[in-house]
């Protein structure tokens, strides 16, 4: 039963990531949704078996998600809030 649920969540992750990509056009948002739902699938898998290899696999999934997201956001351009203020054309200097 857990395997079917994990498979369904994994498939939903792919579809949701694609829907976010098409809907917003933001690949970072789509990646975030995909990674979060794949993390959920990994944690559901952990619910099916509670031994050390399953726990290590779930921890590896969470770690991979965090590292991948950190790598993706490291090269992100700063938002408008971080850009320097614009001067008026007639301002001195």
Image: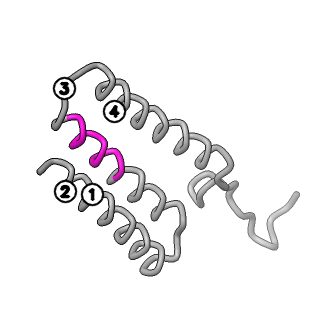
For the residue pair 89 and 83, the one nearer the viewer reads as 83
Label 2, label 3: how far apart the Cα atoms are: 17 Å
First in sequence: mark 3 vs mark 4: 3
Q: Dot 3: within a 10 Å radius of its alpha carbon, few (fewer than 14), some, or many (20 or more) residues?
A: few
Asked whether the beta carbons under mark 2 and mark 1 sit within 8 Å of each other, the answer is yes
Residue at 85 percent across and 61 percent down: it is 92
Q: Height in image: 76 above or below 17?
A: above
In the orientation shown, which residue stands out farthest toward the left? 1
Q: Which is more N-terminal, label 3 or label 2?
A: 2
How far apart, in angstroms, are the residues tagged by discs 2 and 1?
A: 5 Å
Please give the residue where the numbered disc 3 appears in the rendered image. Answer: 50
Marks 3 and 1, how far apart in space?
18 Å
N-terminal-most mark, 4 or 2: 2
Q: Which residue is mark 4?
A: 58
Residue 14 x, y percent position in the rendering: 39, 66
Per the image, is 41 magenta?
yes
Q: Horizontally, is 18 left or right of 80 in the view?
A: left
Q: Position of residue 10 (x, y in %)?
A: 32, 58
Query: Between marks 4 and 1, how big is the CA–CA gap?
Result: 15 Å
Marks 3, 4: nearer the viewer: 3
Give the magenta range.
38-46
């Amino acid at each position: 039963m857990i395997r079917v649920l994990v498979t369904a969540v994994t498939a939903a992750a792919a579809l949701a990531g694609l829907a976010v990509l098409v809907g917003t056009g933001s690949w970072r948002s789509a990646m975030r949704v995909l990674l979060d739902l794949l993390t959920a699938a990994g944690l559901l898998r952990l619910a099916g078996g509670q031994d050390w290899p399953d726990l290590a696999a779930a921890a590896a999934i969470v770690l991979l998600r965090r590292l991948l997201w950190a790598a993706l956001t490291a090269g992100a351009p700063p938002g408008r809030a971080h850009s320097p203020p614009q001067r008026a054309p007639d301002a001195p200097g």
